[in-house]
Amino acid sequence: MGVRTFGLAMRVAVIVSSVKVIDASWTTAHIIDAMTRLGHTVRLLEPTDLELTSAGRLVTRAWCIDEPAESVEALSTLIQSQTAPRRYVELSNIDLLLLRVNPLPGYLLQLLLMAADQGTICVNHPGGLARTRGKAWLASLSGVPRPETVLTASPASAQAFARTQNGPLVVKPTQGSGGRGVRLVPAGDEVALEKAVIQARTFGGQAIVQAYLPEAEDGEKRLFWVDGELMGAYQRNRTSGEFRHNLKQGAQPSPCEVDEADRAICAAVSPHLRRNGIVVAGLDVIGGKLIEVNTLNPGGVHWSDHFSGSPHGSLASEVVRSLERVAARGPQSFGAPPA
């Protein structure tokens, strides 16, 4: 067992979309495993487990994970089986609430904002998630290397943007993950562009229209960012006949080098993330440009750790040590830079 920087064992609550789907490749499982191995206790819950009492206190039913499992695989089996002891916990007694939910429904966002207002340290801060969870946020940032991008619900506006570009376009829904609803539009194909914009809108919201980067032929990096630091990285290479690099679309993970362009991206986006109370994020990078920021439930620990050559579990332990430092700083006012 390593030396804890927090000084005392933390009481951590982890909220997930569903315990039934967590397996040993999930970042959530690796972080929980590292927490228990570093002496912290974990209370695991789903969104509908949260309750607001008549006295205005936030409580939750939670599965209790107090001891390390034999392995991450054994831990994920325990989580999926829902056989761990279960009891009520008051959020005011929690040192840190780790949010691993995607998508984030409106009712849950409201409860999490209440929790943050009552002094619960939320990672990531729900106010920041409200700002950053959509793909449009990146398009609003200055000083960050990124593809040219517009946000619109209008095919005509998308076509006007297309005429300023010299190549294909990528059209995405403003919400969602896993590559769902993302389309590649050939240069000059106005009919396909209109269909892609209309289809993106069916996911709710508007469409993100983004210049396609030719460097995508060489793969896409996932950088795992924690509290201002680049913790790990791996590459995703799309499968034959597919332009998306999402693992859920058949892409294959592989090792990658972290270069100066990656570090420059992290340096450029870190102030924006930290100002919004974001502590953990996944940064998707192609050709030295940031194409997407994932703040809801970012993954990357499993494959980054797998390809690093370091002892298994090292990256997850480093993430937990960063979370210890976040908890030690105490609650932050939303929008204020961390101490």
Image (cartoon, helix red, strand yellow):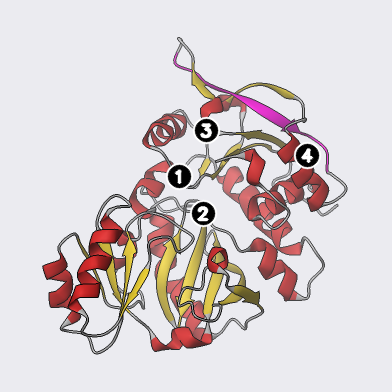
In the picture, measured across the screen, residue 99 lies left or right of residue 61, that is: left
Circles 1 and 2: CB atoms closer than 8 Å: yes
- Label 2 or label 3, whichever lies nearer to me, is 3
**CA separation, marks 3 and 4?**
19 Å
Residue placed most toward the observer, 163 or 297: 163
Q: Which residue is mark 1?
A: 125
Residue 217: tell me if it is visible: yes
N-terminal label among 2 and 4 = 4
State whether residue 98 is above or below residue 197.
above
Q: Residues within 10 Å of mark 2 (few under 14, many from 20)?
A: many
What type is the residue that disc 1 sits on?
Answer: His
**CA separation, marks 2 and 4?**
27 Å
State whether residue 333 is above or below residue 162.
above
Residue 333: tell me if it is visible: no
- Label 2 or label 4, whichever lies nearer to me, is 4
In the picture, measured across the screen, residue 104 lies left or right of residue 166, that is: right
Q: Secondary structure at mark 3?
A: helix
Image position, residue 123 (x, y; %): 52, 46
Q: Secondary structure at mark 2?
A: loop
Image position, residue 49 (x, y; %): 56, 26
Image position, residue 119 (x, y; %): 48, 32
N-terminal label among 4 and 1 = 4
N-terminal label among 1 and 3 = 3
Q: Which residue is mark 2?
A: 279
**CA separation, marks 4 and 1?**
28 Å
Q: Which residue is mark 4?
A: 78
N-terminal label among 2 and 3 = 3
**CA separation, marks 1 and 3?**
16 Å
Q: Which residues are magenta?
A: 56-68
Q: Residues within 10 Å of mark 3 (few under 14, many from 20)?
A: many
